[in-house]
Amino acid sequence: MTTTALAHDPMTAADRCDRCGAQAYVRVLLSSGGELLFCGHHGREHRDALQGVARDIQDETRKLATTPATAPADER
């Protein structure tokens, strides 16, 4: 997914996917003025359709590839 140069507030654990309720990592600002939030899975699943109706897409799925510092040593 692409993201334009607009500034965004980072998404937090409180942001939930509108499709399944999981933590959201993709925010879609619609051309019509609305907003949709998606987990990484549903963001990828609906990517093509979203690009057709989005004014902007904020994709933070890169966060899924990092291991938190609080993870046990054998997971770092």
Image (cartoon, grey):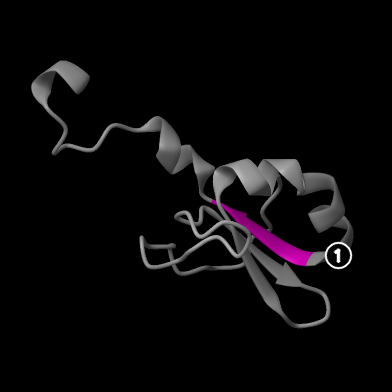
Q: Nearer the viewer, residue 74 or 10?
A: 74
**Magenta region, mostly helix, strand or loop?**
strand
Q: Residue at x 54, y 68 (%)?
A: 7
Q: Nearer the viewer, residue 18 or 5?
A: 18
Q: Quadrant of the C terminus?
A: top left
Residue 15 versus residue 32 in the image, above or below: above
Q: Is residue 57 magenta?
A: yes
Q: Is residue 76 in sight in this rendering?
A: no
Q: Quadrant of the N terminus?
A: top right
Residue 15 is drawn in which quadrant?
Answer: bottom left
Q: Residue at x 69, y 41 (%)?
A: 44
Q: Which residue type does callout 1 highlight?
A: Val
- What is the residue that sits farthest to the bottom in this orientation? 33
16 vs 54, left or right, is left
Residue 72 is drawn in which quadrant?
Answer: top left
Q: Nearer the viewer, residue 66 or 38?
A: 38
32 vs 45, left or right, is right
42 vs 66, left or right, is right
Q: Residue at x 66, y 68 (%)?
A: 36
The magenta segment = 55-59
Q: Is residue 71 in sight in this rendering?
A: yes
Q: Position of residue 49 (x, y in %)?
A: 86, 53
Q: Position of residue 70 (x, y in %)?
A: 13, 39
Q: Which residue is mark 1?
A: 53
- What is the residue that sits farthest to the left in this orientation? 73
Circle 1: element type: helix
Residue 55 versus residue 38 in the image, above or below: below
The image shows a total of numbered marks equal to 1
72 vs 21, left or right, is left
Q: Would you call the spot at circle 1 few (<14 residues within 10 Å), some (14-19), or many (20 or more)?
A: few
- What is the residue that sits farthest to the top in this orientation? 74
